[in-house]
Image (cartoon, rainbow, N blue to C red):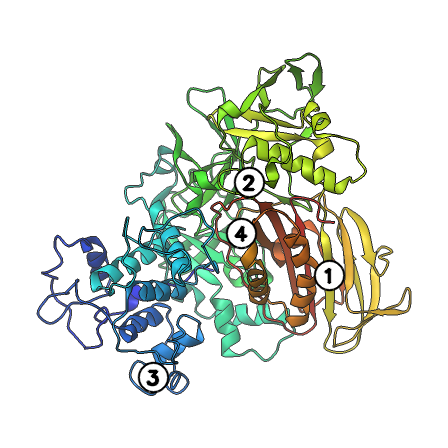
Amino acid sequence: MLKKILISLIAIGLLSVVAVSYAADLYDVGGHDNETAIQYLYDNGVISGYPDGSFRPDSVVNRAELLKILVGGTGVTPSVSQYNNCFPDVKDDWYAPFVCYAKSEGWVDGYPDGTFKPEQYVNKVEAIKMVVNSQEYYVPNTVSGYDTVLFDDIDMNEWYAPYLHTASQRGLLEEEGSFSPEALMRRGQISENIYRAMIIEAHGLYTFDDYRSDRVVSPYFENGDIDFGELTPFDATAIMAGKTDTIVNGYYEGFGNDEITQADKDYLLGLLNWYEAGTIKVEPYEGWKLLLLELQCDGMCFRSDVYRLAYNSETNELKYLVDYSDGADHDYLEVLIGNQDSDVSLSGLNPPQTVSVPGMDVTLELESAFADFNSATYIGEVAFTESKYGQLYFAPEQYGYGCLYFESPDGVISQYKYDIGLLDDSVVINWEEGGETNLSSNYSLTHRGCGIAGSCYFVDTIDESEIVLAGVTNDGVELYEVADPIEGYSENKDPEGISRKPQYLLDSYYQIYLRLNEDTSVTFDDYVDQKPLLYWQDPFGRWSSILLDDFMPAAECGKPVIYLYPEETTDVSVEVGISEMTVSIPDYNEGWKVKAYSDGTLYNYEDKQTYPYLFWEGHSDKELKVDKGFMVSKKELESFLTGSLKELGLNAQESDDFMEFWYPIMMDNSENYFYVTFVGTQDFNKIAPLAIEPCPDTLLRVFMYYEPVAAPYAVIPQELKGMERRGFTVVEWGGTSSRTWK
């Protein structure tokens, strides 16, 4: 969900509760370390100086003043009657609504003695915690095991270390070397933190470090049919006038809800975000604005629906540009996207299908294009500059994605893949020691199971002294194997630096094979002789690998459990659109037919037995790419899973069932960390759609994927989001892993 950083709408003195008039200029800001930040906030009406024209950037701020700014920045005006008396020292004072609202949202929790100390000056770590919490950034429970050292005066075991870690990841901090955690927060410093948060939001970034104020529009866009400007939020009041009730009623009718509250209305309309990207230069829309409408997920998903529309601000006419959008045709949005144009041709709007790499006989193919306004984190170092299309980027090195990325001026990220052709049917490898092998029938890129896939191939950072030439394909591609295989190397309990070493990967796949085949006669030497792990280098000098199919762990959809909660006793049929059903309780028989009771009890007509839920396992031939998640240590796994399941909307019994099954399985791995991601209803429907009759009012599906890893690495944090239960509710949870979990 995009946080609405409406701090720019606050026209009060920054961190001052005294009414002041706007100064013509801030005479004491010039030359200050935070001048750019202060001036930006001042120019946007966020702050105002004192009557004498000063800002006093080196003055300190108290806790109540800071919360007034942060609460106001969310667009919320807390009720005085509702938010008061939340601490012994916060009763009905002017700051009570802000402090009490912040407490209700979990931003603050007071001191051990139960007080809040509103007029106490706030130190730097307390202020950073409030800023991070107000932006709803993901904060790990602990960072004590992380390799990263934030500052030389920070103990990674301190309570505030996870907040500083998150703030550092997001680029909110200006400090280098030392942080001085107990020092008091000053007006200039907090201006810097808020300025960076605003830039992140305004430009759809993950981190401030991705901000490039000198971005150049490439000739492909410059010479196209759109005059692109800065992508900015758009006030759609005129567009939405007279349409909101139609949208809201149409949406909630699907849930059978005829008692729509203001909270219901606010929730739905809050999922719609409008942006202005530029002006169309050609007929039939010459002079019309190019708008983007983002429909955030109702529940959790990896991608929002995004619609491009042409808008005539004089006539208030809206035209949905079908071929330039990536959004579903939701019936309740008919009043916004019903007026469609599927014939217009606009150059320089959609990304190119292919891009040739200068100086190489290499062509990149468009794999997907998506408007993910928090995904500038995909943009790392420049890979190359093409004369027409401009710059293509590697993903940030720490994420290890093999794709390249192209960024359009309106926020669309295009993902390009390089196919070396290793697994084409005609490709064979001629081994250095003699003989040949067809690669496509024997090797595969690593997969994740049950339809979960990564983004292109994974990039390995290796020392070339650790590999030796194994053979060359008939296309001239060199493949390498591990130079010094070491049995048991993956059991090394010291995780630093070994998780992607060739020796580690080679041995880890063998150890998994042994666990799954306890009666095997394949020794480690036999395994190595079969050339199970081969490395290849892409045109950009990056290394990746392929694995022999005989040793590829086969993962499946693990224990998806389906709960049915009708409002009254109802006969229900359930079918799962899965490629292969391997286990089911009760027996599936091309679908279940049960009598469902409101407490969730199920009577199965086939065997005349009762069950608490429907259980299945199976394989899917469909694929969903995931590139966001969490890095979780073993010691925080239980609290992470418990908190995540609650946030995703599972009730206590459903969460207990999930934990009873998955927690011990995950803890049984020898690695000390996990990459964890969750697939929500919208995305899991693409892998294993459910056909339920009668149709439920609410369908909540939560599916976990995890990879055990020896050492933590950077991942793009995933935003978890639940779904309100209405009427006949169906809930399902399940999971899978990069390795077989049985």
Residue type, numbered disc 2: Ser
Q: Earlier in the sequence, mark 1 or mark 4?
A: 1
- Give the secondary structure at mark 2: loop
Where disc 1 sits, the SS reads strand
Q: Residue at x 66, y 62 (%)?
A: 659
Tell which circle, 2 or 3, labels the residue nearer the N-terminal end. 3
Crowding near pointer 3: few (<14 within 10 Å), some, many (20+)? many
Q: Is residue 667 above or below residue 119?
A: above
First of labels 1, 3 by sequence position: 3
Q: Which residue is mark 1?
A: 561
> Alpha carbon of mark 1 to alpha carbon of mark 3: how far?
46 Å
* CA neighbours of label 2 inside 10 A, class few (<14), some (14 to 19), many (20+): some
The answer to whether marks 1 and 3 mark residues whose Cβ atoms lie closer than 8 Å is no
**Residue pointed to by mark 2:** 455
- Report the amino acid beneath label 1: Val
Please state which amino acid type lies under the numbered disc 4. Answer: Gly
Q: Residues within 10 Å of mark 1 (few under 14, many from 20)?
A: many
Q: Position of residue 405 (x, y in %)?
A: 46, 38
- Residue ID at (12%, 62%): 26
**Residue at position x 11%, y 62% from top?**
25
Name the side, left or right, on which 540 lies relative to 12. right
Query: Which sits in the foreground, 619 or 340?
Result: 619
Q: Position of residue 519 (x, y in %)?
A: 81, 38
Pointer 3: what residue?
90
- Label 2 and label 3: CA atoms lie apart by 50 Å
Visible residue check, residue 346: no
Cα gap from disc 1 to disc 4, whole angstroms = 22 Å
